Amino acid sequence: MAGGRHNSYNIIIPIRSKSRIILYATSLVAFSFLLFLFLFSSPPSSSPPSRFQFNAAVETSFVTSLQHFLTLKSPHHHNDDTIDAGDVSKLDSGIYRTEMERLYAEDNYPLTLPIRVYVYDMPDKFTYDLLWLFRNTYQDTSNLTSNGSPVHRLIEQHSIDYWLWADLIAPQSQRLLKSVVRVHKQEEADFFYIPFFTTISFFLMEKQQCKALYREALKWVTDQPAWKRSGGRDHILPVHHPWSFKSVRRYMKNAIWLLPDMDSTGNWYKPGQVFLEKDLILPYVANLDLCDARCLSETNPNRKTLLFFRGRLKRNAGGKIRSKLVAELSGADGVMIEEGTAGEGGKAAAQNGMRKSLFCLNPAGDTPSSARLFDAIVSGCIPVIVSDELELPFEGILDYRKIALFVSSTDALKPGWLLKFLKDISPAHINEMQQNLAKYSRHFLYSSPAQPLGPEDLVWKMMAGKLVNIKLHTRRSQRVVEGSRSRCTCECRPSNSTNTGAISGHELELAMAAYFEPLLRFKHT
């Protein structure tokens, strides 16, 4: 028996055990083969490289991203337009059919994401040619604005038109955002995007040449059947620099303007041109590098400066408060105020100062906003905002009270008030705001590819909130009888203010006058 067991062990394998071994061996071979394919397979050589790969490094430099964009520019993805340039009624019928299909098929329409955007195929002179103009003249450091700012750096600050367009025209399979999708038929669109680089043309073209290009762009867009159908209400126009497109933009005031702020002095925008219900505030592109989690952990314990400001100390219009604040704060203990300088040296000084400071002063300039606010945010320096008319990006989504301090101009100019206010803030509150800054910084970093919860993403989430109101006003304009007194023309809207106190008698008197003046005028006519 013992010998038999020995022989059986050496030459005979039971059937059940043999089956298990074969199964295990087969599985191991199959797994090894799949692993080999995964590790060593490569895409076909005919596939062009793309900067929009999901695993590509995120690029936040406008200059670097633009260089890649122009070098690796994909062929045009032309839209499948079936609408004759003059056939508004055909487009209207197509949009009606699409809207009805979605209304009965989608439970939450029209509040659903993604937003559907049709990107106009504008001639290259409005798009690629202007990007090449920027790229080819970037080294021209002698090109300065009237106040001494480098023109190309100014264009970078306002380059929101590039970041949005580059993301929209990328192949959908290579994009990361789920809040917006590009459609190639006009009847499928919620919005129409106008890819005209108004800031580049303003600063880099001769004045009369620029104005001529503006007029050409105006005619091209307003000739489109989609514009004629809605009066432009569902069209998105990037005019992020307040000087750009100024000579003709009154003819496009119904469009949704992408703005840096809403100046109420009348210097940049005329009454009735801009308001929050229609337009959208977008952040500037930050001048400074992001202070990431590791940077913040190293710098926060060493922020010894209480309050920091670096920039031009004298500004026009609403920025006159700067010189007054400088006079009030200069020489105070824990305060660093410096006259700003352009170029890499100025950037390094500003970045170094912000990363060593607890609070960064953000007073109004020529306009209520500036890139300095977003420099402070990405540097982990708590903004102290002294700008009574400031409107902020994505405020329907983000609560700025968690990352910034808002101080009225009246309080800020009281002797000793601002410094006492800052010194009385508890370390726990400061620490909480610094942690929130670390979380919020991602919302202000334009990038390629555009990132979820980045500014490009929040643009479309905010735009979704405008959609129902836009459809309401578009349809109303289509059916109201011409000349009817029910046509809405009043654009009276209160300006933003940090004053939350009770209304004064004088303010009440002005408000009553503004309310009754149109009625009295109508009575006399």
Image (tube, helix red, strand yellow):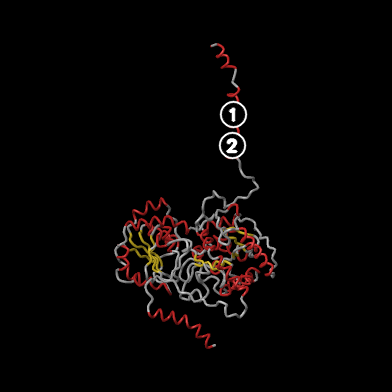
Task: Residue 90: name its quadrant.
Answer: bottom right
Residue 13 image position (x, y, % from top left): 59, 20
- Say the numbered circle drawn on residue 36: 2
Indicate which disc, 1 or 2, sits on the residue closer to the N terminus: 1
Give amino acid for label 1: Ala
- Helix or strand or loop: what does disc 2 sit on? helix
Q: Nearer the viewer, mark 1 or mark 2?
A: 1
Work out which residue is located at the far bottom of the displayed protein and give it.
Answer: 524
65 left or right of 436? right
Residue 37 image position (x, y, % from top left): 60, 38
Q: Residue at x 39, y 53 (%)?
A: 296
- Helix or strand or loop: what does disc 1 sit on? helix
420 left or right of 99? left
524 left or right of 385? right
Q: Nearer the viewer, residue 367 or 150?
A: 367
Task: Residue 9: name its quadrant.
Answer: top right
Give amino acid for label 2: Phe
Residue 103 image position (x, y, % from top left): 61, 61
Q: Quadrant of the N terminus?
A: top right
Q: Is residue 147 above or below residue 482?
A: above
Disc 2 packing (10 Å; few <14; some 14–19; many ≥20): few
- Say the numbered circle drawn on residue 25: 1
Q: How many marks?
A: 2
Q: Are marks 1 and 2 in contact (CB under 8 Å)?
A: no
Disc 1 packing (10 Å; few <14; some 14–19; many ≥20): few
Q: Quadrant of the C terminus?
A: bottom right
Task: Residue 212: name its quadrant.
Answer: bottom right
